Every structure is written in C-alpha cells, then in structure tokens.
Image (tube, rainbow, N blue to C red):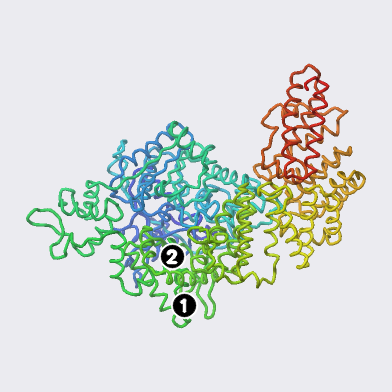
Amino acid sequence: ATFGLRGSSFPNMVTERALPATSALHHSLQNDLGVYNRVGATMGNAYCGVVGGVKRHEYAVLGPSVNLAARLMMTATNPGILVDDMIRMRANKGFGFNALEPVKAKGFALPVPIYEPLTNIERRWGRVKSNFVGRKAEIKKLVGMAREMTAFNSAAKLALVSAESGTGKSTAVLQSVEHIRKFMSRKRKRTLIAKHVCKEGDKLVPFSMLKSLLPDVLGEVQAWSDDKSATTGSILSAMSGSDFTDAIDADWEGLSAASQASSNSMLSGLSGWSASPDRLLHLCREMDASPEFVELIGHHVLGLNKDALHTRDDKAKGKAPSLHSTINFMAQAFQMCTKRAELVIVALDDVHMMDEMSWKVLYKLFITTRNLFVVCSSRPLKDYNLEIEPSFWNELNDKYTEQGRFVHLHLSRFTKANIRSLLAVELGLDEEQISEKLQSDVFKQSGGMPHFANEIIESAKRRKAIELDKETDLYTWREDDGGSQTTFASIGELIIHRVDSFDANVRNVLNLAVVLGHHFDLFEIVAVVHQFLQVNNAQKHIHTERVCSALDFLVSERILIQVFEGGEVEDIEEGHTPVKDTVSNPFQFGKRVSNRSFSFCHDVWRASLLQMMLASRKRDVHRVIAMTLEREYGEGDRDYTTRVKLFSHWKESGDFVKSASLAMSLGKSFEELGLHQQSIGIYNDALDMWRGTEESEESIGGFSEQVLDSLGVTDLEYIIKVHIGLAKCLANLQRAAESVATYQNALKIYEAAPASYGFEDRTIVFPIFSGLFICLKFGQIEQDDECTYEQNLVKKFVNETRLNGDPVHYARSLAMQGEVHARLGNFEKALAAHKELERVYDVKKHSAGICKAYGSDRAGQSYSASALWHMELNNPEEAIRTCHYVINELMPHMEPRNVHNSGVLLYPVMWTMKDNGLALEARENWDKFVVQAFNEHFGEGAFTFALPVYKPLMMLLDLAGKEDEEVERFEEYLEFVLDEENLKFGKVFNHGMGNVSRVGDSITAEICYYVAKRLEDGDERKVTLVRNGLDVARGAAEISGKGMAVVAHTQSMQALKKLESLAEEMGLI
C-alpha cells in the first residue's frame, strides 16, 4: 500500500490516513480472516513510475524507503507493525510508540531506529501477557458477562475487581478485556475499548475519567476538516502473511491471551486519530453546545489549547453549563460516539482514586446505555472509600446484583500452585521441573503476592541464583549464591536492595522521578534536573544525556514503562527554548529530540522509595518540581489536572501561600460549576498543612497555639481566606453545623494569632462576620431571646467597617444592623440604620463589589426589607415607593446570573406589593428577574437555595391577583396543593426564607386558602384543603414567632387568619 503519490498527497497524511489504515488492515487480516501478518511502514522519497520494457513492464515504487519497509516487515522481532523514525515524527503527539532495538538495513550506513505503534490500551495500561498465570475463574466470569450482553443486547453491566496492591488486579482486568476482545473479534462484532487509569490527586479533579475516555470515543466522530498543512513524500507499507493454522476454539480455554494485536476497536487502536480538537468542536456543534461549554470540556477537562477551541461559528454568548447539563453532555457524547459498536468496554483502573463527578457520569451511562460493560479495579473497599453516590452503590449491591448487572470480585493472594506456575512461566520451564524448596521459598517470601513474587524471581534471574540440581533433575537455588538465605522481609526491602546496586546517576534520576509522580514526561524530568542542579547552558546536553541514559536503564530493569510520542521536535536555536506540549524542550542547542512519557510499572516502587526518603529531601524536590513546572506551564489559564498537579507539589514542598493560592483559584472554578464538594476537598487539603493530626482541647480552631504563634501575616491571611471559602461551600451544601464551626474557627484563629496585628487590609475578615450573620438568620446558631451574640457580632462588624472606611463593607454592616433591629421589632432603629446606608450606598458603584465580597448585594436587599418595615409602621405609601425603587432603580444594575441575589432582593417586595393589591405586577417582575434568569443561565438540574419556592410563589401571586377572575392554571394549582408533600418545606428552608421575609410554609398555606375559596361547598377537596392549610399555617406561625424576623410572623399570621375565617364559614372550627 502506498500513500502520497504525486497528485494524491493530502494534509496530515500520516496521522489521519496512513497509520489508521495500516493498523486497520493488519488487525482485519489477523482477527477477522485469521491471517497472520507483519507490516513494515516507512516514509521517504521514492521513485514512482513504470519499470520495464515495451512487452513487460509494471508500475513500481523503488528506493531506500521501500527496501527499509521490506526489511522491517521481515524482522524476526516484528510484533505486528513496525515503523521508522520518519513515520513517528510525522505522526501527531496523540500517537504512542514503543522503541525497539535499531536494525541494520541496506542503503543505510547507521542502524535504523524502529518503533512499534501502540494501541490506547497498551499506551495507558501496558501490554497483555502471553503467558498469564492464575485468575482463571475471575476472567471466565467477566468474559461470561460480556458474552451474555452481546447475545441479548442487554442493559449496561459493571464489574468491580478489588484486591491489595501487588495482587495483580490491573493485570487481571487487562487480560479479561483482551479475552473479551478476542471473543468479539471471532464473532465479527464491532467492539470499542476505552481506558482510564486513575491517579493520585484525581479525586480533586472533576470529570478526571473523561480526560482519557472522551478522546478515545471522539475517534468515532467521522466528520472533521483537514487542515491546510501539506505533507510531502510517500508512505510505504509492506505486508506478508500466511493462513493462521490453528483456529480459536469456541470454549473458554480457546480464548488465548496472546500478545498480538490488542485492539480491534473502531478507533483503529490508535489514540492519535482522535487527538484533534476538530472532533470535539464537531461533536459540540452537533449537540448545540455553547462556547462556554466547549471551553469547559475542551480546555479544563481535556486540556486542549483554548485558541484551538474557538471558531468563527462560535456564538457570542451562550448559556453557561450547569452541573446537570455537563453530566448529561458527557454521557450523551459518549453514547453518540459509540452507537455503532456492538459492545463498548470501559476499563477503569484504581477507581478508589476517581472523583465524584466521574462516578456521576458513569451512573448516567449505566442507567441509559445498552451493551456497555464497565470493568473497574480498586484497592480493598474496607480501606478505601469510593466517591460514589450511596444510592447508586446500594442499588448496585441490591437490585443490579440480582439482575446480574453488577458483580464484585475480590482477588485473593496466589496459592503455592500459582507460584509454581509463575516460576515455570518466568523461567521458561515445565512446572514439574520446579523444586518444592524453590516453590516454598518464593511463596513464603512473597506472601502469595504476585508482584512481589515476580520481583523475587527477577532478582534471582539477574543473580543467576537458580540452577538445575543434577541429582534431582529439578531447578532450585544455586548453592554458592545463598539461595533461599537471600530473603527479604518485604518488597520494600527487596527494592532498596536493587536500588543500592544502581550507580549514583540512576539513583538520583529515580529519586526525582518518584517525587515527580507515577506518570511523567522526559521533558519534565530533564527540566527538573536542570533546575535542581542549576545547570548552565554549556552543560545542559551532558546532563540531558545522563538523564536519558538513566531512564533507559530503568526501562530495561522493568521499573519504568516508556512510550514515545509522535511528532517532530524543531531545532533549538541558541538562546531560545521552544515550548512543546506546554513543557519547554530543555535539550541543548542544535539537538533534535523526541519527548517520551514514562510511568512506573507498579506503584509499589514509588511507595517504597518515598517511604525511605528523608522528609526534608522530599520537600526540597517538590519545591524544585513546582518551580520548574510553574515556569514551564506558564502563567496562562491551566486545565484542572495541571492546576491540581501544581497544587500538590507546592503543598508537599511546605509552601502554604503558593498551595493556598492555587486552592482558592481551583475552589472558585469548581464553585462556578456547582462542584462544592470538590472545592471542600481542595480547601481541606490546603488547611491540612497547618492543622494537627487530632484536634485537642488546647487547639484553637483546629490549630495549635505553637502553630498560630509561628504564622506570618501572609500565611494567616490565606488561612482566613481558605476557611471562608470552605464555610461558604459547606453552607451551599446545607451542612449548616460544619459551616458555622468553620466560620467560628476562622474568627478564633484571627483573634488568637499575633500576626493579625500586622494586617494592613482587615477586609479579609469581614466575610466571617457576614457568614456568621447568615447562619444566625437561618437559625443555625443558638442564642438568647435578646440576641446578645448577634448584637455583639454586628456591633463589632459596624465598628470595624467604619474604621476601614470602604463603603462596600460599611454598607454591608449597616444592612446587617438594620436586620437585627427589625428582627427584634425595633423598626424605627432599623430604618435609621437603613437611612445611614442610603447615604453611603450607590448601586452603580458598590453593588458589584458587595456581591464579590459577600456573594450577593446585602445593601440592596436592605431596601427591600425596609418596605416591610414601613408596612409594620403603617406607612404603605412609602412601602410601595420603596418597592418600585427596587424594581426600577436597583434591579437593572444587578448581575442576571446572580439569581440568588435577585431572588433575595425581590422576595420581600413580593409580599409588600401583594398586600397592596399589586400581586400580578409583583408576579411579572419575579418571573422576569428570577425565574426566567435562572432558566436562561442555569436551567434544568441546577440548584439555588430559594428554588423550591419559585413555583408556589408564582401560584400564590396569580391566585391573589385574580381573586375575582378566572385562573387559567387553576387545575394545576389544585393538583399541587392536594399533594400534601408539596405543603411543607422543612425547618432549614423555612428559617432561611423567614429571615428574608416569609416562611415557605405560609405560602403554601395561603395557596390552600385561595384554591379552597374557588371550590363549591360540599366538595370534600375544599374541606381537605382548609384543614391541611390550617395545619400548615399554624406551624408556620409557630416557627416564625421564634427568633425570626417579625415581618415573617406577620405574614404567617395573615395566612392563618384567612384560613380560620374560611373554616368558620364552613363550620369546621
């Protein structure tokens, strides 16, 4: 096959055509037709034309590239497909390649570098083992589940494989997936396999699972536009084949997990095919997603460059994605891209580290997708918690287990028989040739842990410690090696023994790698080495070569796994270091280099080496890594994964200011999406740097006195800020007690830490007062009848803000003071405080600042509350004037997206206008500024605290405004109030809304009144509504009379009196 002949070359030829076609051809011959084949693919200039005489001639392609393709095809070590370095460089960075030993070829003076293209599964999870030992029953179970799915087109299934680290759970899942793939290939069924390995820190990254899965399935989107770049030369593929002699048997035993072609997915097994953002843009256009949505998914989740995500077709302004719509989009995108597959396998490794949002997407897929088989691996659940919804987990273990849609498999340690089989496989022997002593010693030392047993065997092979005993004709320990005496108490001890045998350069690189992370790039570790050793330009190439040499050695020792990326690296000019893949190329001038990615073969290597490293050394390395990566990633907007990665390194380095700054940035980003739980996690992670392991009676806000005394001004400022952010998130999740405790801890820390005297800007602590005040309004802090705690808090806040002099904060404190006076029934004092507020507050200048500092415009809300205060003082004219001022002068300047602010600002106005015959006008404005704004900017599935009252409020205003007219939606309203579950909102909601102006229960009680009035006497529904309304109204009157705003009690009593009057007319009381 030839690509790129004269007149037929096209852009991105290697990435988009040649490599996918080569892979598809190879896998189709091997898997569909049973034809064993090997492919060699090269790229270069060649002669293309007619060769021969007049009578006998042919069109041929000749040249060194053709010869090299044939040489690669015939190479004995060819695993299926081999390519040259030109192919690898012309492929994009989404492709992965495994470097093999260079070969000598005719026409080439030097050995030619060769590479094997890797499939998605191989790139992220590793290779399938041809001689896998054990786990037969578990693999058979998983294969059986998949076979049932394809036979009956069944609903999605989920399998969870849990085991201790080192037990081989990941390998067992990989083998199972390969068995299923082979079975599906034999049945000629289309299979798609997507894979994600969860990493440390993923719990803090929302939708982390999708960073791998979505690019995999995006390969199924067929429409995309070729770019304008041109590719020259031709691509040549040579193929040889023969009939596959042994057909695969139909039974389980015949499902051999040979290491040949590991993917027959519709992705052609190559991740590079789906790497372009064009696929995502096309998909988003098909799903009518807004530019904000594209940026969230493309940049923050997938890490694509922002510039690549903008097109001329982008809408100027779209609806921001809500959490609900984001989850739905992820699930629908997955389903759209995989709809042609007859079986979709999603393999997830180490799901005990997977974030909550990924589990939500998985749940959505599980309940809505057919022929989806999710296979997860995890550490033991008794030691690790899954971030899964409890309801989903309960359903999995109950309903879905009974239906055969969920199975939980726990892998035990290897038996002695398994160890014997492992020894035979690793040593290339028959099981009968293994001595009992060798088997027992390895079993005893490893404790039956497969990975530990493998390490012991590898160590023995390197020492040549196993030999044939001629007397017994069995393989056992070599006598002069010490054999079984060379024992290790743990795998960690064995690892340390191996590391001690490495030279200093390898040990240094390995120590940097374990701190850098489980996965890292060559460019990253080289940049870190240069920074750590303060290497000058003249010495960079020397140290770079030493790093590469050390990494190559660690790969050969099976400590690291190496994957080359596709793509060509430009020459580096003197004095300039180009940026590639967000990490600059640190190689010395004039060198052409290729980035590579590395990962540890098993996390036990990292865990063991980190455990023995001195804490001070780890902090130093983390600091250098953080500094390097921060410089290399640049100051631009980074994706979630990158920011969490930087946060973790700064945190481990002991730099609280840097880590807290990143935590605040991440937390606010998460909050914008409604991901409050993720924000809480990142805030707590930051605070853990200073907190003690256990809170004692002597601690202050969770911090020891010694720690508080040692804090600097900047440290204390960030501790306060993080506490405030944490408290707000807890409040948004209605975790009231924790929110109160967090605010109070912040205040205690501020008052106890000596560094607080050095604060130049004391506005940092103002949100604490505001937060505690809101908690008081919601009844979350107990206090006496005189509200002593609250009055002292407000007095302190007003004094602080007056001294500060900023009208933004002073107006907020005056609004708070007015509310306290009104709650105690001192309406003249409340209006006096509001009068002072009017003197300092300018909506155009201050509203946005107040919202930024306190979440909503509390000063503007004071105007609304003052309308009710005027009503209490029997001044309806001034009350109505104030209502119209709020609607006409304040509301137009409020941010439409801040629906919570609009709702709280208008809520008191609604009741003032209703009580003065303006219910329909009030309803129109509530619909315009609150309901419609919420639907436009957030939509279905989103939430705000006042949302439950939206519908009842609209009903009540409609009924009250049309008391003597026909109500079009009367039947809907009747059905609503006849359902008793709709009549009560609960204590927390009632307390919160009551302190704004009216408890929710009094609204539904009054709806009962208006609906009942319209029913005929003798209608049992009328009796039911009056009785239910009375019950609800009495409860509302009772709760609104206890520590709540007086105006709320007034509103409750009005509703109760109406119902009592109607009940008397009906003879019910």
Residue 713 is tagged as none
| Residue that mark 1 sits on | 588
Image quadrant containing the C terminus: top right
Q: Secondary structure at mark 2?
A: strand
The number of numbered badges drawn on the structure is: 2
Instruction: Specify the farthest residue to the left.
Output: 471
Q: Let me know if residue 51 appears in the view.
A: no
Where is 63 relative to 189, above or below?
Answer: below
Where is 99 relative to 976, above or below?
Answer: below
Disc 1 from disc 2: Cα separation = 17 Å
554, 352: nearer the viewer: 352
Is the residue marked by circle 1 packed among few (<14), some (14-19), or many (20+) residues within 10 Å?
many
| Residue that mark 2 sits on | 596
Instruction: Specify the farthest residue to the bottom.
Output: 538
Q: Amino acid at mark 1?
A: Gln
Q: Amino acid at mark 2?
A: Arg
Q: Is residue 835 left or right of residue 21?
A: right
530, 963: nearer the viewer: 963
Q: Is residue 627 left or right of residue 33?
A: right
Q: Earlier in the sequence, mark 1 or mark 2?
A: 1
Q: Secondary structure at mark 1?
A: loop
251, 721: nearer the viewer: 721
Is the residue marked by circle 2 packed among few (<14), some (14-19), or many (20+) residues within 10 Å?
some
Q: Give x and y (percent) for residue 1030.
A: 75, 29
Q: Give x and y (percent) for residue 1061.
A: 83, 26
